[in-house]
């Protein structure tokens, strides 16, 4: 052990340290610039995508003898028309489905609270309504962790007048649940 490992000294020149610090600061500046300009970058990317997607249609009209400006205007109007047509085709059924869902939610909450329906097993097997109520009692309606998104279910059931599984006393009844 007479030949103990000799200690190595690593030294850096000041220029190397300054270059590394400069690279780090430049990277930080670039990342902050991208963060601040994210919305603008997103719009630029959308514009590039649309320009690339619509360019074949513009070239089609150019080959037919139209100037590029007129061809671009025609393609733009046609694209807006297609988007509006899709909106008229898809939005009314979507609104009807959302309205039906919103009308159906109180019934689902009543069924879950009573242990019936397709989600009744959540109450009968896992006692989810009781757990949500306990979590709300502990953390309040805005609490997180165990309550999570189910706090809105319990709040909505209270607003719709749904009774707890065991009535006002909070005790669970031993009656078998109805199957729907």
Image: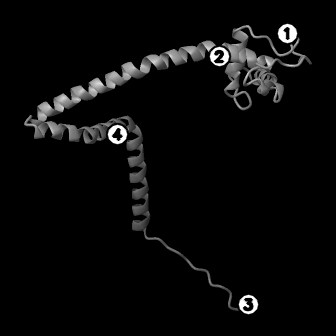
SS for callout 2: helix
Report, in whole angstroms, how far the alpha carbon at label 4 lies from the one at label 1: 56 Å
Q: Give residue 170's position: percent from left, percent from top.
A: 87, 15
Q: Is residue 23 left or right of residue 111?
A: left
Q: Are marks 2 and 3 in contact (CB under 8 Å)?
A: no
Position in image of residue 161 (x %, y %): 73, 7
Q: Quadrant of residue 80?
A: top left
Q: Nearer the viewer, mark 2 or mark 3?
A: 2
- In the rendered image, the vertical position of residue 13 relative to residue 46, given as above or below: below
Q: Quadrant of residue 133?
A: top right
Q: Nearer the viewer, mark 1 or mark 3?
A: 1
| Tag 1 residue | 168
Task: Identify the element where label 1 is drawn.
Answer: loop
Residue under label 2, please give it: 105
User: What's the distance in space between the residues labelled 4 and 2, CA to CA?
Assistant: 40 Å
In front here: 137 or 165? 165
Mark 3 sits on what residue? 1
Residue 100, percent across and down?
Answer: 57, 14
Give the residue drawn at x 40%, y 58%: 23
């Amino acid at each position: 052990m007479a030949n103990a490992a000799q200690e190595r000294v690593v030294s850096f020149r000041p220029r190397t340290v300054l270059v590394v610090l400069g690279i780090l600061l430049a990277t930080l500046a670039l990342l902050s610039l991208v963060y601040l300009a994210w919305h603008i970058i997103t719009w630029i990317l959308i514009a590039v995508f649309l320009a690339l997607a619509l360019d074949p249609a513009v070239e089609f009209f150019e080959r037919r003898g139209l100037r590029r400006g007129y061809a671009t205007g025609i393609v733009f109007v046609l694209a807006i028309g297609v988007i509006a047509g899709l909106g008229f085709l898809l939005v009314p059924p979507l609104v009807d489905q959302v309205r039906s869902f919103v009308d159906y939610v109180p019934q689902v909450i009543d069924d879950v609270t009573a242990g019936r329906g397709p989600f009744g097993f959540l109450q009968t097997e896992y006692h989810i309504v009781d757990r949500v109520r306990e979590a709300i009692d502990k953390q309040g309606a805005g609490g997180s962790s165990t309550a999570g998104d189910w706090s809105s279910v319990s709040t909505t059931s209270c607003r719709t007048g749904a009774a707890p599984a065991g009535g006002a006393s909070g005790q669970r009844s031993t009656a078998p649940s109805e199957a729907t």
